[in-house]
Amino acid sequence: MRILVMAGNYAPEKTASAPLTADFCRYLTAAGHSISVVTTFPHYPQWKVWPEYRGRFYKKEMIDGVSIYRILNYIPKRPTPLKRVLYYGSFGIQALLPALVSGRPDVIVCVTPPLELSISASILKVLWRVPVILWIKDLVPDIAIQLGMLKSPLLISLARRLEDFAYTNATKLFVLGRSFAENICGKGVPVEKVAVVSDWVNTEVIRPDIPGLGFRQKYEVDAAAFVVLHAGNIGDKQRLELLVRSAKLLHERRDIQFLIVGDGARKAAVVAEATSLGVSNVKFLPLQPQEQFAEMLAAADVLILHQHADVTDSVIPSKLLTYMAAGRPIVVTAAPESAAGIAVSRSECGVAVEPENPTALAQAIVRLLTDQEFRAHCGTSARAFVSASFSRATVLSQLESLLHESAGIVRPNPQESSSPRRMNKPAPTSGDTRNGHEVGTSSRNSNLSRKLKIQMAIKRLSDVLIATTGLVLAAPLFLLITILVRFESPGAVIFRQLRSGRNRRPFCMYKFRTMYEGVAHLRNPDGSAYVGRNDPRVTRLGRWLREFSLDEIPQLLNVLLGDMSIIGPRPETPQYTDELPAWALEKLRMRPGCLSMSLIHGRNELPWQVRNKLDLDYVRNYSLSLDLTIFFRGVWAMLITRKGVYSPDEVGASVFDARAEDAVEVTSYQTFPKE
């Protein structure tokens, strides 16, 4: 499948949802799917764009085989409630443009928050007619209201309306646990629309047997110290000032060392709290690279998950699962009824204490320090719990199946290719050789020049801009033709026909109806369906529309939907696609176009094999300059010369007699990556 993922955070960011979203995309890529990600520039948790990404508004890059489309949004230096609304809203709306450039997928996955992504996703759902999955990582606006970040009745009302809009327009909702599902269904969402998909952890990477001494030595932590570790975001949800106060209560215990590893909006406040209290047993370390994360956890004796007192069922931290995989005891400051509190109780992985109670937290740490048997039991239980239900392979396999189900595509067996077959004959694959020409090989795809990738991105952006402008300018003419077609003969104004798109993807092509209703399926005496100048099936208005190619104006909608391009090979019906000779199959590697090489070389007067040869020439010798040539010459051919509008009488069923030896050699070729 082709899957578009829209997410506010992505690799190389190391906190929040970024690591799991990136791992999810890596898994799907390894399974054979084509993944595109629309996201922002890396900026979290520092709340400023990373130095290596600054000075750009848009960037496309490839990470682990995943195409990443980044767009710059508003990023506040100090996130206040209002600034967060602008932060989320700017990305949620701006994400539409790079999503259009990425091309039409089989399914869209929106990782929320931000819920504002549902605005762009809903537009794409209508344009592309594809399902949208809302993957809910936090219950917004619930969490913002609980934390006191959202207090204005007006803002709360608007947030609730956005939430209702997002849930209503999504095809499916993926949630992290039963508490999330109950919350959402309690807001009127049908139960059958919700699927529970937990977070996961790579239990092969995060393990209890990894040595942590090297990490201690690197940061000058005593090898004999009892290390209490917090790792990750330092924000409003964590309120780590309270952890510092617990450290102050234990400052006389020289054998206990607190490590606060990470960054975030409240780090300065937490450091200031430590300074004001004069604590000497707290050390602040920077965010660690992903490859050192397991070693960092192994260096700890106790892991801390600190949550705000008002956080109940709105947050299920993936960090908790990662902690469990490390096989270390965990102290959670969370309400007993919260998802984190319930998980600690069920797994017996540690101790859950009252939130915002530094004394209770300090007592729990001392208990784990003094009771070695209890500490070992908690670590062993934690590892067993996460391995049984939250391993990477188990959860991501379930998630992949749900994606197939949502897209309406049968998931292939493991022995088969993961790419669904939508037509009877598959498009050329890696290693196919036809008439001495290697077709669509992976080696050529992997060696595509940067110039060609840029050209393809510009081509898609140009398609969207030209189609949008054309539809706006042609709106009065569109309306006039609609009235005339309706007035002249009964029937639908728009003629719809199934065509084969890029990589044989079937799509519905739109045209103004130029024939009388119910006669399009009739054939000429020779069995062909070609339209001659005096074809009795064509209406009087239809002849005029065909003469100036005005019947093809609705194809601009196909361009916006991502089914077609302004310039490209001719769109064929599935019947004709099945009859294509082997040498012509490579033309299916690009989107079909409204304008083509055939248009400027004689159009319908050309034999079928010559048209295929021209299409193949276009695909193998593609460039933006060639597109410009075809565009201007094509417009001239449609409006001025109008050559080849109708098929000559001698062109009929014999066009199917094309043979491989009719193909003319071409001197160069290029293949095109999955967009």
Image (cartoon, rainbow, N blue to C red):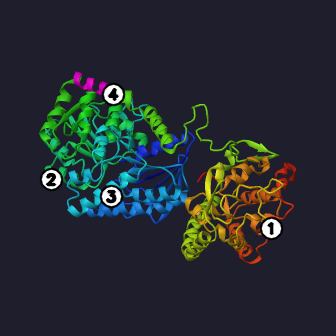
Give the number of the disc on residue 385: 4
Distance from Cα at disc 2 to Cα at disc 3: 42 Å
Distance from Cα at disc 3 to Cα at disc 1: 53 Å
Distance from Cα at disc 4 to Cα at disc 2: 40 Å
Q: Is residue 377 magenta?
A: yes
Q: Using the image, determine if residue 605 lies above or below residue 440.
A: below
Give the number of the disc on residue 602: 1
Mark 4: which secondary structure? helix
Q: In the rendered structure, which segment of residues is drawn in magenta?
A: 373-384
Residue at image coords 66%, 51%: 447
Residue 66 pos. (x, y %): 53, 48
Q: Nearer the viewer, mark 1 or mark 2?
A: 1
Is disc 1 surrounded by few (<14), some (14 to 19) or many (20+) residues within 10 Å? some
Lower position in the chain sequence, tag 4 or tag 2: 2
Distance from Cα at disc 4 to Cα at disc 3: 37 Å
Residue at image coords 55%, 55%: 104
Mark 2: which secondary structure? helix
Q: Using the image, determine if residue 180 lies above or below residue 122.
A: above
Is disc 3 surrounded by few (<14), some (14 to 19) or many (20+) residues within 10 Å? some
Question: Between 343 and 352, which is closer to the camera in this rendering?
Answer: 343
Residue at image coords 20%, 42%: 281
Residue position for label 2: 276
Left or right: 516 with respect to 376? Answer: right
Determine whether label 3 and label 1 are within 8 Å by CB: no
Q: Is residue 17 magenta?
A: no
Lower position in the chain sequence, tag 3 or tag 1: 3
Determine whether label 2 and label 3 are within 8 Å by CB: no
Q: Using the image, determine if residue 233 lies above or below residue 516.
A: above
